[in-house]
């Protein structure tokens, strides 16, 4: 073992990432070179040739392309386009009703997507023009959708949670259950924030000027495709009828059948959904292969154990350890996309968390929340850039970053609650089965 080689590998990895080398390429290069230095060329080639199959052949990971296909079919077939209209009719009379409707629409879209970027882009195109026309300040309207999009990775089926469950060897179903509690909590606190802004600063989020028609039966027509998918997938998943992996296949088949039944699924739309599913899956799996190689490199060098032992020797308390981890991920979130930030840190953190007897289901949910905060923090908040592209005629990049400030503060409150009261996650996650 060579701890020095491992530490050098971490330094080179960080340098390559700072130079904007793709995460997957950086992970694979550093891991291959490190194993070559320690064990020789042939063992390095052996790891490089066996790791892709060992990783991709994981049965649990087959849920990733299936859930992605469900989301892309639902999006391209227009099954989610009326979510905002339905939520708006329910909440229009309330102060900040349009903003709250946008958050609820993001929550509904999240249940068939699993991606915060897709959630922000899809709902942003629909909700932002309506909010601007109603008199919302552009920075607040765009900030609401950028923050609302982060719910996309918290509400199952979250791709981040699936990847975490595989790497941490934890039940994906239980992580999903914990994610529901945090996703709903995030949506509720965002709605409360919007309500308070509308009450205190009507110049930012004006009160409704005229009453709309009362809630009518057309809301059911707007939301039933998503509602059926939710009941089908999560009713069976959390009811124990099938596993998270099987739920992905059920969800994909359900989305295709519902889209075909509503006559919204053309061959071109289905082909586009398939191509986007393949492209996204390949990108995620390549990063995963690199992360597995990096984990093996750190294990062979003894670096992961060395770092874990060193931090354990510091005798950090629970609060100190959590503060350190929160700061780490908030900093990484400013410069890296979530998958890369998660997969380069888990090999080091998991041994430390096990030594500290931290519940890994709870930590997985906290981790996803931390990573999603990074999606709206400067300078590289990816959701902010997506919203800026979607709403470029209404707001600039600086406007969107200003608009998410209050939501970032709300997220910090949520993170504090999760650390102080882990049972907010564990009590619900404990209901999960397989």
Image (cartoon, rainbow, N blue to C red):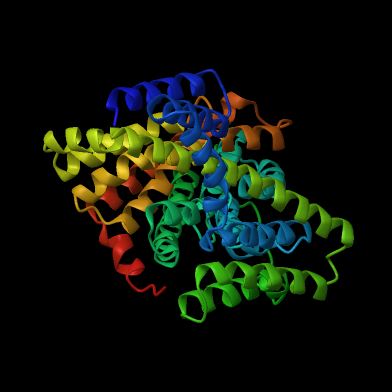
Give residue 196's position: percent from left, percent from top. 43, 47
In-image side of 418 versus 290 (left or right): left
Q: Is residue 360 left or right of residue 120?
A: left
Where residue 188 sits, quadrant-wise, is bottom left
Q: Residue at x 75, y 69 (%)?
A: 256
Which quadrant holds the C terminus? bottom left
Residue at image x 33%, y 46%? 415
The answer to whether residue 407 shows anywhere in this view is no
Total count of labels: 0
Is residue 312 or residue 218 the one in the foreground?
312
Q: Compared with residue 27, is residue 193 higher up or lower down, i.e. above or below? A: below
Residue that appears at 88% across and 56% down? 268
Seen from the viewer's position, the closer of residues 206 and 304 is 304
Residue sitting at the far right: 267
x, y percent for residue 217: 70, 77
Residue 151, how many percent across, how many down?
A: 51, 52
Quadrant where the N terminus sits is: top left
């Amino acid at each position: 073992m060579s701890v020095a080689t491992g530490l050098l590998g971490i330094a080179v990895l960080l340098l390559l990432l700072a130079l904007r080398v793709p995460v997957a390429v950086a992970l694979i290069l550093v891991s291959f070179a490190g194993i070559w230095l320690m064990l020789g060329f042939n063992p390095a080639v052996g790891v490089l040739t066996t790791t892709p199959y060992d990783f991709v052949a994981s049965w649990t990971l087959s849920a990733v392309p299936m859930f992605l296909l469900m989301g892309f079919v639902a999006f391209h077939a227009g099954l989610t386009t009326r979510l905002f209209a339905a939520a708006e009719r329910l909440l229009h009379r309330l102060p900040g009703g349009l903003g709250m409707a946008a958050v609820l629409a993001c929550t509904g879209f999240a249940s068939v997507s699993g991606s915060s970027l897709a959630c922000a882009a899809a709902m942003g195109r629909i909700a932002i023009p309506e909010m601007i026309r109603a008199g919302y300040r552009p920075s607040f309207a765009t900030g609401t959708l950028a923050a609302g999009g982060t719910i996309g990775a918290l509400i199952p089926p979250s791709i981040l949670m699936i990847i975490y469950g595989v790497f941490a060897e934890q039940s994906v179903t239980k992580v999903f259950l914990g994610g529901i509690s945090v996703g709903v909590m995030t949506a509720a606190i965002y709605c409360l924030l919007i309500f308070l802004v509308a009450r205190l600063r009507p110049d930012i989020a004006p009160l409704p000027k005229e009453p709309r028609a009362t809630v009518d039966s057309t809301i059911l027509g707007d939301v039933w495709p998503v509602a059926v998918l939710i009941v089908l997938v999560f009713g069976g998943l959390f009811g124990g009828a099938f596993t998270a992996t099987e739920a992905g296949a059920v969800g994909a088949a359900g989305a295709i059948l519902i889209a075909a039944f509503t006559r919204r699924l053309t061959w071109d739309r289905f082909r586009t959904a398939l191509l986007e599913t393949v492209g996204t899956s390949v990108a995620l799996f390549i990063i995963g292969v690199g992360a597995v190689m990096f984990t093996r490199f750190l294990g062979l060098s003894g670096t992961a154990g060395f770092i874990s032992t060193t931090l354990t020797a510091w005798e950090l308390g629970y609060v100190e350890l959590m503060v350190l981890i929160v700061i780490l991920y908030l900093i990484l979130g400013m410069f890296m996309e979530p998958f890369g930030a998660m997969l380069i840190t888990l090999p080091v953190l998991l041994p430390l968390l096990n030594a500290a007897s931290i519940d890994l289901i709870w930590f997985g949910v906290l981790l996803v929340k931390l990573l999603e905060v990074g999606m709206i923090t400067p300078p590289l908040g990816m959701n902010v850039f997506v919203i800026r592209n979607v709403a470029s005629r209404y707001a600039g990049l600086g406007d969107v970053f200003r608009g998410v400030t209050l939501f970032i503060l709300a997220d910090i409150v949520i993170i504090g609650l999760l650390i102080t009261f882990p049972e907010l996650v564990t009590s619900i996650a404990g209901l999960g089965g397989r």
